[in-house]
Image (spheres, grey):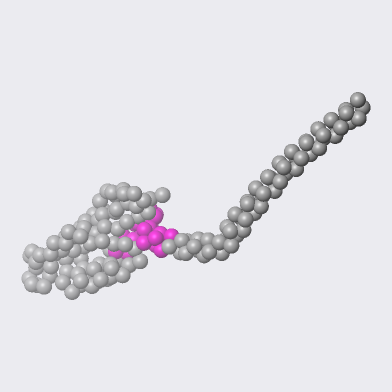
């Protein structure tokens, strides 16, 4: 009876250890698979860092093209100075309400400008070379009334710049 009892206890202990070994074997295999996945990610780490750096550069360019709120008055002042520098006279410089879109807002400005055609063309050329996005639409050009000079034109247009929404 004692031998049977000892054999039963031995068998019970052996089966518990076998079960524990089996569980540990599964855990080791899961850990090996996890290590393999992390090795793959680690080999791609340099590529991911390079991609992150490229995306950071693209973000800097986008922020340059789309100023934040605090930079809009400075941009409008810069545009005004470009027109005066080109020899144009501003009759109207009227910022309109913003028009929000997905991640940006349009900032329209109505302009009424008087000056010679070549100065107007130079002004538009300077606008195109700004580091910010500036669209000029709804251009209406006519002869300036009350001007004895046939080359003096009056120009009405809508200038639209953009700002980044947070």
Q: Residue at x 31, y 49 (%)?
A: 101
The rendered magenta stretch, by its main secondary structure, is classed as: helix
Location of residue 124 by image quarter: bottom left
Q: Is residue 49 visible?
A: no
Left or right, 159 with reference to 54: left
Q: Residue at x 78, y 36 (%)?
A: 15
Left or right, 54 with reference to 164: right
As drawn, 4 above or below 106: above
Q: Residue at x 68, y 45 (%)?
A: 26
Left or right, 121 with reference to 12: left
As drawn, 58 above or below 26: below
Quadrant assignment for the N terminus: top right
Magenta span contains residue 55: no
Magenta span contains residue 63: yes
Q: Position of residue 161 (x, y in %)?
A: 30, 58
What segment is highlighted magenta in the picture? 59-79
Total marks placed: 0
Q: Please name whichever residue, 56 or 37, is drawn nearer the observer in this view of the structure.
A: 37
Q: Residue at x 25, y 56 (%)?
A: 109
Q: Please name whichever residue, 104 or 8, is drawn nearer the observer in this view of the structure.
A: 8
Which residue is most to the top? 1
């Amino acid at each position: 009876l004692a031998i049977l009892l000892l054999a039963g206890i031995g068998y019970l202990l052996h089966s518990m250890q076998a079960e524990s070994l089996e569980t540990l074997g599964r855990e080791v295999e899961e850990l090996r698979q996890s290590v393999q996945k992390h090795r793959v990610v680690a080999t791609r780490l340099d590529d991911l860092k390079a991609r992150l750096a490229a995306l950071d550069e693209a973000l800097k360019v986008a922020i340059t093209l789309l100023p934040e709120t605090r930079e809009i008055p400075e941009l409008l002042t810069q545009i005004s100075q470009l027109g005066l520098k080109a020899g144009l006279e501003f009759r109207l410089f009227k910022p309109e309400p913003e028009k929000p879109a997905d991640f940006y807002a349009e900032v329209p400005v109505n302009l009424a400008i008087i000056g010679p055609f070549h100065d107007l063309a130079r002004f538009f050329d300077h606008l195109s070379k700004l580091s910010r996005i500036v669209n000029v639409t709804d251009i209406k050009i006519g002869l300036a009334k009350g001007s004895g000079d046939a080359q003096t034109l009056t120009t009405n247009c809508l200038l639209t710049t953009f700002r980044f929404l947070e």
